Image (cartoon, grey):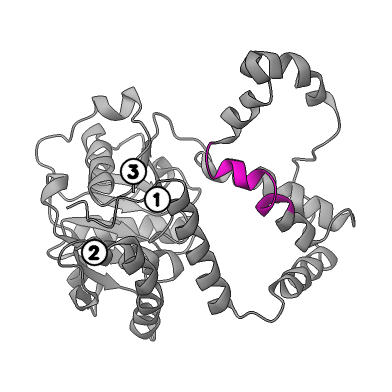
Amino acid sequence: MTSPEKTPAATALSPAPGFVPPESVRRVACVGAGVIGGGWVAHFLARGYDVTAWDPAPDAERRLRRLVDAAWPTLASLGLAEGASRDRLTVAETLEQAVSDAEFVQESAPENLGLKRDLLARLDAATPPGVVIASSTSGYPMTEMQTTAADPSRLVVGHPFNPPYLIPLVEVAGGERTDAGAVAQAARFYEAAGKSVITMDNEIPGFIANRLQEALWREALHMVANGEATVRDIDLSITEGPGLRWAVMGPMLTFALAGGEGGMAHMLDHFGPSLKSPWTRLEAPELDKELYDAVVAGCDEAADGRSIADLVAERDWGVVEVLRATGRLAGGEGTR
């Protein structure tokens, strides 16, 4: 998959001495093997890495291998890296075993700040020196998570999007006590692993893409709560509307085109006054039982008898076709 043009901040950074060079990483440890962690496992295996995984759940290995098996046909259609194999997955019995010989660590534990702090501190204590530890957190700034680690300088955020084996984007950010070289090492490693990377200069709550997703999500909940639109209406409005344009270019350039030859300047002049119109309600609605039930029932109706596994397969193949149609596949060759 191709990467977006690098920002000056991203290209100016270089890994600090002492960190494992990104291009030499061969073994990745994935700590936490749920939907996100398991997705990371599938991605790294498809890119030809050796992967050691650990999760405290008693049935974690069975669920993880089932997830990888389900994702593998999609990954094969994208093009596996040389040597890529599901046989290169090892499931460790302890966290310490999982990271003992790791050259990069991806943490994907549940979104609980206390849990993240304790786990990152344990990972820091058990992981060899010079190895970057990245968190898949979807909202916590690293500054808030690195408070109890003995060496917070190597802790970074590596925020993926579900499913990590298919959606290219990773947002990378450090905390106040993170070494800039660790941020750069993580960014370069993800790029070597076939990801598109945004290296953030500043920590912001929810990062970039989740902030935008959250605004859309809140509006959707308000419309359901007020009986203004159904779940099916909302999804159709995106898949058959602006989502088609967003698959090619983002909302900013999309809006710039609405200004015709005058571009964004004309668009702002023409549509700027509508910003004061009461179109949006960005404060989150109260998630009471009525709204909760309406959203769940609406999704069941929209699924129309399809299981979660059916929907995952439909989503994955759909994304593959969009990536193929927009020229964002790397021709089936690995990046390593």
In this rendering, which labeled residue sits more in front, label 1 or label 3?
A: 3
The correct choice, above or below, for 149 with respect to 28 in the image is above
Q: Is residue 144 above or below residue 255?
A: below
List the residue tagged with mark 1: 168
| Badge 2 or badge 3: first in the primary sequence | 3
Kindly state the secondary structure of the residue where label 3 is placed: loop
Nearest to N terminus: mark 1 or mark 2: 2
Residues packed near mark 1 inside 10 Å, few (<14), some (14 to 19) or many (20 plus): many
* Alpha carbon separation for disc pair 1 and 2: 19 Å
- Mark 2 and mark 3 in contact? Answer it, CB < 8 Å: no
Report how far apart the C-alphas of labels 2 and 3 lie in the structure: 25 Å
Which quadrant would residue 120 be assigned to in this image? Answer: bottom left
| Residue carrying label 2 | 29
Q: Earlier in the sequence, mark 1 or mark 3?
A: 3
Residue 81, percent from left and from top: 21, 61
Membership of 183 in magenta stretch: no
Say which amino acid is labelled 1: Pro
Q: Find numbered disc 2 in the image and state the secondary structure of the residue it sits on.
A: strand
Which residue has dot 3 on it? Answer: 2
Q: Residue at x 75, y 52 (%)?
A: 220
Instruction: Find residue 90 and report its horizontal and vertical position in percent.
Output: 21, 76
Q: Left of 59 or right of it: where is 81?
A: left
Q: Residues within 10 Å of mark 2 (few under 14, many from 20)?
A: many
Q: Is residue 111 left or right of residue 45?
A: right
Image location (x, y in percent) of residue 295: 76, 66
Q: For the residues carrying marks 1 and 2, which lies nearer the camera in this image? A: 1
Is residue 38 found left or right of 12 in the rendered image?
Answer: right
Which segment did they paint magenta? Answer: 237-249
Secondary structure found at label 1: loop
Work out which residue is located at the far right of the displayed protein and give it: 227
